[in-house]
Image (cartoon, helix red, strand yellow):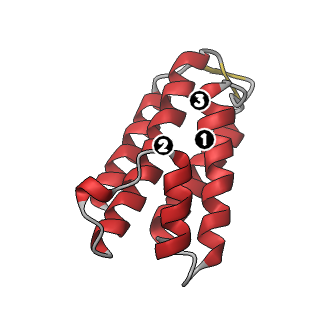
Amino acid sequence: MKEALRYLNNAKEILRSVPVDDNTYRDIKPVREAFATAYLAILEAINEHLMKQGVTKKELPKSVDAYRKALQKHVAVHNGKLLREFEKLYDALHIAGYYRGLIYDVTMVKDALKAARVFIDHL
């Protein structure tokens, strides 16, 4: 999961330069960028896991629905919680954090990145 952790560390690095007032990031653009990078860390972790399971690079998922199916087939059989965690992380990191830019509270951002790390570690 080396590459996935590299992405996650990049997300944290992006946030270090963002000014904070009253536990709120003042500039949303880099926060959204950090969320996008953290979401990519999740996808990289899944890709690495799938390749260890024998999935070729060409066969890796190319959409969120394909990732769901791959998780159901290769992961949920052994750990159904990971599929639910993926859904929560997709909603938090990709939709709320990156796509809509709704999360800019420092504590909430850090919690989301911690949840991403836990997912990667459990995978």
Q: Which amino acid does the dot numbered 2 rest on?
A: Ala
Whole-number angstrom distance, CA of label 1 to CA of label 3: 6 Å
Element assignment for label 1 = helix
Quarter of the image with the N terminus in it:
bottom left
Position in image of residue 123 (x %, y %): 46, 70
Residue at the extreme left of the image, as rendered:
57
Q: Which amino acid does the dot numbered 1 rest on?
A: Leu
Q: Residues within 10 Å of mark 1 (few under 14, many from 20)?
A: many
- Reading the chain from its start, which is encountered first: label 1 or label 3? 1
Q: Are marks 2 and 1 in contact (CB under 8 Å)?
A: yes
Instruction: Name the residue carrying label 3.
Output: 98
Residue in the picture at 43% in, 51% down:
43
Residue in the picture at 70% in, 31% down:
103
Say which of 121 and 43 sits in front. Answer: 43
Q: Are marks 1 and 3 in contact (CB under 8 Å)?
A: yes
Q: Is residue 15 left or right of residue 94?
A: left
Residue in the picture at 66% in, 24% down:
101
Instruction: Name the residue carrying label 1.
Output: 93
Position in image of residue 82 (x %, y %): 59, 69
